[in-house]
Amino acid sequence: MRVIVAKTLEEMGKEAGAIVAEGMRAKPHYVLGLATGDTPKPLYRELIRLHKEEDLDFSTTVSFNLDEYIGLPATHDQSYRYFMDHELFNHVNIVKANTHVPDGMTDDVETHCLVYEATIEDVGGIDCQVLGIGRNGHIGFNEPGSSLASRTRAVDLTESTIEANAPHFPNPEDMPRRAITMGIGTILESEKIIMLACGPKKAAAVAAALEGPVCVKCPASALQLHPDVTFVVTEDAATGLTLKFRR
Ligand code: GLP
């Protein structure tokens, strides 16, 4: 796995943006896998800049988001659909119909997950999947203990994730306890993967993902099984790594 250690959040966004843009420019109908949370925001700012200043074209881009809370409508400001619209989609020329986020309000979760997987397959799979990492090593909402072969499905969130994300809700009790997430098996089928991480709270998870055993205790360790993964992390998230990974 390649590791790029960035000095600032802006640099993290630029490094990741350059990889995404290179792929998009090389292949029309590029299929992006996207993540939410605070970490990918610098990347989305960079993609918006590249669109506005360097003609990066999203008109044929297709996207699939990793996950969504069960029970939140797209209009809720903590829903991942709302996040994506506001942090990226509304600012570039992507066709909204080509953007996919799991529907947290579906009344048939199982069918919805099967259709989500089938839709990814129909467009030829994900070319580049962007990931963040949870403090407990989760990717998407694949919490520790998730099967490394898991597919898109409904999951229960762990206390650690609820504690990390609940403060974003005006009333923390309102944070959903369940979510739909792409599986680890789904993620590993992407052609290329970019993992972003920043902040000291992610250092242990980043070290476990890169240097620990491949193990369900740290879902992100499954990325070691993939042939094309780049970690783009800030220095404070890289403190647990040994020298061989430092740039
Ligand atoms: C959330 C999301 C993940 C995200 C992670 C880190 O729970 N489901 O996809 O990567 O937590 O979020 P943040 O970047 O805000 O630290």
Image: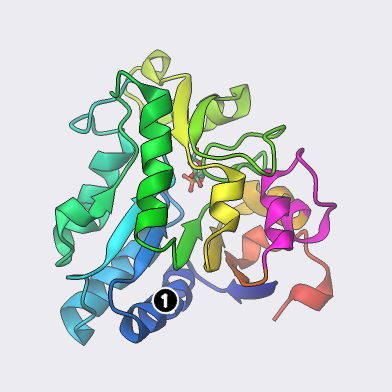
Question: Between 160 and 2, which is closer to the camera in this rendering?
Answer: 2
> The residue under label 1 is which amino acid type?
Lys
Magenta residues, as a range? 208-226
Neighbour class for label 1 at 10 Å: few (<14), some, many (≥20)?
A: many
Quick check: 140 above or below 209? above
Q: Is residue 224 magenta?
A: yes
Give how far across and how far down residue 14 sits, in percent: 42, 76
Would residue 158 appear left or right of 75 to someone viewing this image? right
Q: Residue at x 60, y 22 (%)?
A: 159
Q: Note whether 28 is above or below 45 in the view shown.
A: below
Q: Quadrant of the C terminus?
A: bottom right
Residue 3: x and y, percent? Answer: 66, 73
Mark 1 = which residue?
14
Name which residue lies at 42% across and 36% down. Answer: 114
x and y percent of residue 222 in the render? Answer: 71, 52
State whether residue 37 appears in this view. no
Q: Which quarter of the figure has residue 27?
A: bottom left
Residue 116 location, x and y as percent? 38, 42
- Residue at horizontal 42%, vertical 34%? 113
Q: Quadrant of the N terminus?
A: bottom right
Task: Between residue 182 and residue 50, name the one nearer to us.
Answer: 182
Q: Secondary structure at mark 1?
A: helix
Q: Residue at 40% x, 21% y: name it.
A: 175
Q: Is residue 123 above or below residue 3?
A: above
Number of numbered tags placed on the structure image? 1
> In the shown orientation, is residue 243 left or right of residue 169?
right
